[in-house]
């Protein structure tokens, strides 16, 4: 998985995986469709917030953007788990995406901790 210096590229690739999954689930109806939309929104938002943080106006702005990305990553993990457990999805890579989202959460959390410590 990604190293902290690769988080921009990693979250972009993760977003592409989420889009691919959403396309696979697109034929679903009812609650599955709602879950897929939520997943798509949060899963693509992680990288967008990381990207915004690269042009942060201050350390506080940087930390704020990364905290938003962390919240979105946690939400994405939630939706992935919910989709996996609720519809008996035939999509085989959900477990790997759940693990990847967990790793992204850990990396982002460490970046936030390190940024807060930096002077």
Image (cartoon, rainbow, N blue to C red):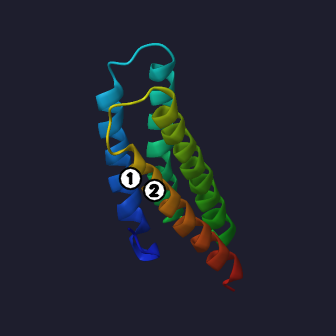
Q: Residue at x 38, y 52 (%)?
A: 96
Task: Provide residue 13's location: percent of width, then percent of height.
Answer: 33, 55
Q: Residue at x 52, y 58 (%)?
A: 102
Instruction: Compute the Cα span from label 1 to label 2.
Output: 5 Å
Q: Nearer the viewer, residue 88 or 56?
A: 88
Near mark 2 (Cα within 10 A), the count class, few <14, some 14-19 or many ≥20, is few
Mark 2 secondary-structure assignment: helix
Q: Is residue 57 visible?
A: no
Q: Quadrant of the N terminus?
A: bottom left
Task: Provide residue 11's location: percent of width, then percent of height.
Answer: 41, 57
Q: Is residue 48 visible?
A: yes
Task: Provide residue 86's location: percent of width, then percent of height.
Answer: 51, 28
Residue 95 to residue 105: above or below: above
- Whether pointer 1 and pointer 2 mark residues with C-beta atoms closer than 8 Å, the reply is yes
**Which residue corresponds to mark 1?**
96
Q: Quadrant of the C terminus?
A: bottom right
Left or right: where does residue 42 sit relative to residue 92?
Answer: right
Mark 1 secondary-structure assignment: helix
Near mark 1 (Cα within 10 A), the count class, few <14, some 14-19 or many ≥20, is few
Q: Residue at x 35, y 27 (%)?
A: 25
Q: Residue at x 39, y 71 (%)?
A: 6
Labelled disc at residue 40: none
**Which residue corresponds to mark 2?**
99
């Amino acid at each position: 998985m990604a190293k902290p210096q690769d988080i921009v590229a990693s979250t972009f690739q993760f977003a592409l995986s989420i889009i691919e999954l959403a396309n696979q689930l697109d034929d679903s109806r009812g609650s599955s469709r709602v879950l897929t939309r939520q997943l798509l929104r949060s899963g693509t938002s992680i990288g967008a917030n990381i990207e915004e943080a690269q042009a942060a106006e201050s350390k506080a702005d940087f930390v704020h953007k990364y905290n938003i990305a962390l919240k979105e990553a946690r939400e994405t993990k939630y939706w992935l788990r919910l989709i996996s457990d609720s519809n008996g999805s035939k999509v085989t890579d959900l477990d790997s995406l759940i693990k990847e989202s967990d790793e992204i959460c850990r990396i982002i959390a460490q970046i936030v901790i390190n940024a807060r410590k930096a002077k």
